[in-house]
Amino acid sequence: MTQNSTDAGFTLIELLVVMAIIATLASLAVVGIPAYMREADRTACREHLSSIYKHLLIYNSKYKGFPTASGPEFVFALWTSKIVDHTQSDAKIFFSAGTGNQPPEDVDSLTADDIDYTGPDQSNMRVRIRPQMRNANDFAIASNRVPAEVEGEEDLSQFPHAGTGINVLFAGGAVEWFDTEDDFGGDYPIIGPDSPIKKLQTLVPDRY
């Protein structure tokens, strides 16, 4: 008995269907995997800011208030005050997964210029920041650093999270994501005096 030719392998239609499925899965991988990785980075960054806040609470208990420094020095005060242990592992909380940056091998050489987070401008502050302050979750105390000046699309590579947004920590302990499309009009994340979001205007942007 001879075998029917249609049973010998794929028909042209079946082959085309399989190729279409493979192409669909490949396109989903191209779009989906980077999006998944950005979401994972965003979550890790959020966890780092939450960890920074826990250490800030220890600092507050010891010094009766949060650090009085401005910008990156505000966050880095946790390191210089020895609130955070000087180990490679503990130094990682100062680096956002959304940048790909890592602590130096010699953590004792770490400076405020190296870290990925910035804090508020306290140069004219009359009241020390505390977690118990009124409307604490409207006062930003740390966020991803962003360039102070942006001249064009080529500068988007300087932004954390591929320019999709930034995580912000508030004095009450809340961490909020501000999206480039939804919160900054699709342009780029802005913190500091020029930010369109009032409660981000006290943060110090990066300077380059």
Image (cartoon, helix red, strand yellow):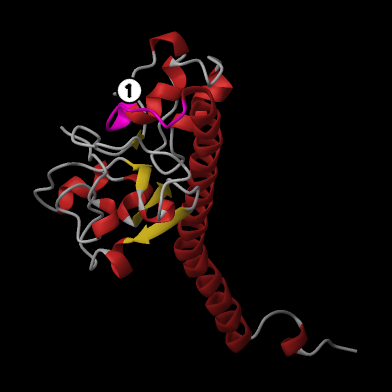
**Which residue: 49% across, 32% down?**
56
Q: Position of residue 5 (x, y in %)?
A: 73, 87
Q: Is residue 183 magenta?
A: no
Whether residue 106 is visible, yes or no, is: no
Asked whether, in this view, residue 32 is left or right of residue 127, the answer is right
Query: Vertical placement of 158 versus 137: above or below?
Result: above
Q: Position of residue 202 (x, y in %)?
A: 24, 46
Q: Position of residue 39 (x, y in %)?
A: 50, 56
Q: Residue furthest left?
A: 151
Asked whether, in this view, residue 156 is left or right of residue 14, the answer is left
How many numbered marks does the figure carry? 1
Q: For the magenta stretch, what is the residue range?
A: 64-73
Query: Vertical placement of 21 versus 81: above or below?
Result: below
Secondary structure character of the magenta stretch overall: loop
Q: Which residue is mark 1?
A: 112
Q: What amino acid is labelled 1 in the image? A: Ala
Front position in the image: 146 or 171: 171
Q: Position of residue 173 (x, y in %)?
A: 50, 47
Front position in the image: 151 or 63: 63
Q: Quadrant of residue 119?
A: top left
- SS under mark 1: loop
Whether residue 184 is visible, yes or no, is: yes
**Which residue: 56% across, 17% down?**
85
Q: Is residue 68 magenta?
A: yes
**Which residue: 49% across, 30% down?**
60
Front position in the image: 168 or 109: 168
